[in-house]
Amino acid sequence: MSAHSSGVQEAAPPRLSLAEVLSQKKIPSLDGLRAVAVMLVIFNHLGVPEAPQGRGVLTFFALSGFLITWTLLRESERTGEISVRDFYIRRVLRLFPAFYVLWILHFTVSYFARGGLSRVAMVDYAAAFFYLRNYRRATNPHPHQYLGHTWALSLEEQFYFLWPWLLAYLQRDLRRLTRVLVALIAAVDLYRMVLYFGFHVSRAWLQFAFDCRVDHLLVGCLLAVLLKRGVLQEFWNFIASRIWISLVTFGLIIGSVALDAHFGLAYKIGVGFVIDPLLTAVLLVQVIAFAHSWAWGWLNWRVTQYIGRISYSMFLYQAVTNLMASSLLGHRVRFSVVVIAAVAMAVLLGSASYYAIEIKFLKLKSRFVGRGSRPVVVRDAALAQPAG
């Protein structure tokens, strides 16, 4: 006889505090957020009505900054050091193989399908190869671009090249690191506004250049540092105390997206690019805290988690699968069917890349990480600091 039929119901598991959730080896909801981000990218690139432009990439940026910083701070807390060498090995094995397989396939197909490539196309491919695609888009916004969507990967790679050194240097003084992060974020915000309102710099530069978008990654870094320090505890406890507060945060994000669509670039630069990453950081904390709630539990469904795990490969191939779905089905079926087909193909290609390439290289990490000389190691016997 079931518990329900006997009139006895199992008690729901007690809700963990935010600190207890963050202390877990695998933080919940983050794969789900990756899934949401990659779906937003796909929908926007397909031209789905009301799909917000740039929202998926912004979510990826804030999430990447948080995860990288949180992982390195936990490493420092556990071992008393941050190994920049090991960080780069992990990043190379995680990102490079799948990316360069895509690059080779894309270049080869384009070259033979067109009987050669123009100088402009070759520069596009070279920029992608050397992770400079964001500045290629910022300075040459021509209509047709090869691997144009990889600008976001280029920007993140540039961030990875710089951030671990600063974090390793300041890991013993997280209070100072907090001040540095706040100053950097504010400086980029002001710099971007001056470029737009004072010098009328192009939209492409403001959207794609590292110097105009790095603050979105730094907001995620700041979130990780604040949570690790335990500062603003009353604020974190408040926003994670009631589900309806998380819905207010979500509503504010939707409102900002609507204002962006209505007022255009002036709102995006003056307001949206400032508050949207901050709201995303707040929502990130809330969906972690409410991982098993009725409002956000779907982020931890198996299917959502799976899409989140393969989101990197899906992002790599979504430009190709979107084009395939639109070309093959665009004039034959309803647009909703095109969208479903594009998502299905992105999942299939993403799964193939994940299992055939990513997993195999990730297994190599244990052979390299933790061995050999370490170019930057800052030891810290007492990382935990009092709030303030």
Image (tube, grey):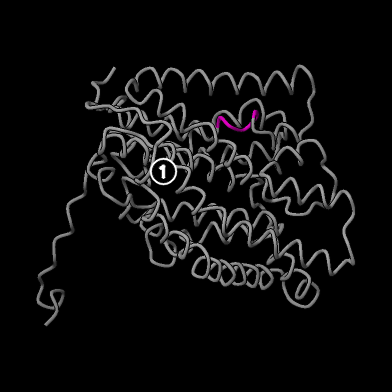
Q: Is residue 326 left or right of residue 100?
A: right
Is residue 46 or residue 140 the one in the foreground? 140
Across and down, in percent, residue 186 comes to: 55, 20
Is residue 160 or residue 282 the one in the foreground? 160
Q: Which stretch appears magenta?
A: 211-215
Q: In which quarter of the image is residue 324?
A: bottom right
Is residue 44 or residue 180 the one in the foreground? 180
The image quadrant where one finds the N terminus is bottom left
The image quadrant where one finds the C terminus is top left
Q: In this view, does 140 lie to the left or right of 98?
A: right
Q: In which quarter of the image is residue 13?
A: bottom left
Q: Residue at x 66, y 37 (%)?
A: 260
Across and down, in percent, residue 316 comes to: 62, 58
Q: In this view, does 28 lie above or below 163?
A: below
Q: Residue at x 72, y 33 (%)?
A: 265
Examine the structure image and report whether residue 213 is included in the region drawn in magenta: yes
Q: In this view, does 235 lie to the left or right of 214?
A: left
Across and down, in percent, residue 119 comes to: 89, 50
Tag 1, which secondary structure? helix
Q: Is residue 53 above or below residue 6?
A: above
Q: Please give the residue where the numbered disc 1 appears in the rendered image.
A: 86
Q: Residues within 10 Å of mark 1 (few under 14, many from 20)?
A: many
Q: Residue at x 55, y 36 (%)?
A: 161
Examine the structure image and report whether residue 12 is included in the region drawn in magenta: no
Q: Quadrant of residue 223?
A: top left
Q: Say which amino acid is labelled 1.
A: Asp
Q: In this view, does 96 lie above or below 63?
A: below
